[in-house]
Amino acid sequence: MFNLEREKIINKILKLNKKNPKILFQAPEGLKLMVSREMEEIEKELKNKGVGGDLFLWLNSCYGACDIPNVDNIDLIIHYGHEPLDYIKYKNVIFIPAYHEFDEEEKKKILEDVERFYKVGYKIVTTIQYKKLLKKFNPKVILGCRGEVEGEKILYVGTGRFHPLMLAYKYNKEILIYNPISKKLDKIGKEEIERFLKKRLSRVSKLLLNPPKKVGLILSTKPGQCRYKLLKEIEEELKKREIKYIKFLADNISPNLLFYDVDCYIIIACPRIVLDDFKLYDKDIYTVEEFKMFLNKSFDYKFDEVKEEDF
Amino acid sequence: MFNLEREKIINKILKLNKKNPKILFQAPEGLKLMVSREMEEIEKELKNKGVGGDLFLWLNSCYGACDIPNVDNIDLIIHYGHEPLDYIKYKNVIFIPAYHEFDEEEKKKILEDVERFYKVGYKIVTTIQYKKLLKKFNPKVILGCRGEVEGEKILYVGTGRFHPLMLAYKYNKEILIYNPISKKLDKIGKEEIERFLKKRLSRVSKLLLNPPKKVGLILSTKPGQCRYKLLKEIEEELKKREIKYIKFLADNISPNLLFYDVDCYIIIACPRIVLDDFKLYDKDIYTVEEFKMFLNKSFDYKFDEVKEEDF
């Protein structure tokens, strides 16, 4: 179903020219089980070639190419499911996009379905898994935290709602969804987006009505989420306005960890922590852009996008 | 209440001789809030001395001196609540034991209370926080994963049950507990230990009745839990017996992460993950010593202790 590019991986491992190279495999939730089985095959083939690879599967998170484990003593990390981000310097990491592969009949059906939208002016967006399949439509690959799409009408081709929600939040626009597995259509409608924006705007209003005296700033250790320059900018703003703050460093952020005496937290990490999970937190959490709305007294909602200049 | 040794920390930071040193403060749950406040005082004093420290509090775990965050670009880590472990090479870490301080009257009461047991032959064990206070009794400092205590009768002086449970598991012996905060006595009784041992022995029996065909081996990235040499030993044993296995690497281990097609998992990390939380896991998890009981067909329960030679 997914092309896990076994040959490519084995060649990379052989090129290390080590007798017992330590290899760490990392995959998103949906691919982990498959990769655990793939590792057995890779191990066998390496053995046949006289290499006794010391293979490990990363048990923890793999939220994206932003989320590479901070580990020492590993000769090579095999990261599945994402493309490298251009603003990160990766050391000893190779990326396997895990292209989804379909048989000819299915492929034909998907391309016909998508073509119908493409023809009437829809811009096609997708994730890396379907980039090759949809090549003829010149699709735009997006991330959960980032993506530029021009065009009035947008069709997202992929599974789940995580990626198209980014577009809905960012452009405040209805997003059509085509699932290439089920071949079914879905959408993120105007009402859903309005509801979401209303909720976030009401949290920003709370700040305006009752300005925080002390805030928590949470920086991430994940290489593609560690927006240190952005943190420094926010610190300058807070100093200017004499708002106190305390800085936290975190690998993973979860509600049970935030029990400090601050009025709210600003998440200087993945914006989706705030947008997807804010209801789970006792104290209000804000994206950087949301907090800037408060600072600038703006009511024009802005999606907090991870950008190269944040680092 | 706790001696957080502010002066020592400030001197260490000043000695870095940097204008904006990056300092990471790390503390166990019970000290985190206090340390967050302490950081504000340290920041002020540094400012008065012309140093603009870039201070962060570690938001994630601090289970012991075994659990130092794998972070780059930090000039100094201030770790509260534990003593360094002699089998780890620490880089840029200082340890603040956080000695508990009492007023004279309280101190007197505690010493009198403990003396009553000491006099009748109890061996006094405690955690680093009360080591100084109990000096006259020549107390033994123990960890949750490790500790040697000689003596028929044992009095643990400290809060909580995490530490004395280690002794109960290891020595299969009743442990008396004196809480220096509440001044109350408690114990881990024979029945409780028997109940626990019965449960673990029944899990080991399951392995003997139905030997696993494939197991998951989980190695930890935490510097004081990464028992790599022990992993290699287990691998050799499994190969000999033609039991298949897959290796995992993890920072934190939790039940929702273990969904692989193996018959059980061996936790080559902190033994307390198994002993305290095994009921939370769908599939059986075992300590290394428990798995060795299966390999050796032994029914003599052995506490899995983290040792220098495991690394």
Image (cartoon, coloured by chain):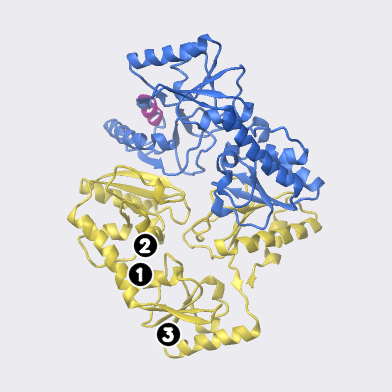
Chain colours: A yellow, B blue
Q: Specify the farthest residue to the left.
A: A209
The residue to which callout 3 is attached is A122
Give residue B23's position: percent from left, percent from top.
40, 38
Residue B54 in view in this figure:
yes
Dot placed on the residue nearer the N-terminal end, 3 or 2? 3
The answer to whether residue A176 is left or right of residue B199 is left
Q: Amino acid at mark 3?
A: Tyr
Tag 1 secondary structure: helix
Q: Nearer the viewer, residue B244 or A79?
A: B244
Residue at image coords 39%, 28%: B9
| Residue interval drawn in magenta | B7-14
Q: Residues within 10 Å of mark 3 (few under 14, many from 20)?
A: some
Chain under disc 3: A
The reply to whether the C-beta atoms of the residues labelled 2 and 1 are less than 8 Å apart is yes
Q: Residue at x 50, y 61 (%)?
A: A64
Tell us which disc is closer to us: 3 or 1: 1
Residue A270 x/y as whole percent = 41, 58
Q: Which mark is residue A275?
A: 2
Q: Secondary structure at mark 2?
A: helix
Depth check: give the residue in front, A53 or A34: A34
Sequence-first tag of 3 and 1:
3
Q: Nearer the viewer, mark 3 or mark 2?
A: 2
Q: Which residue is mark 1?
A: A169
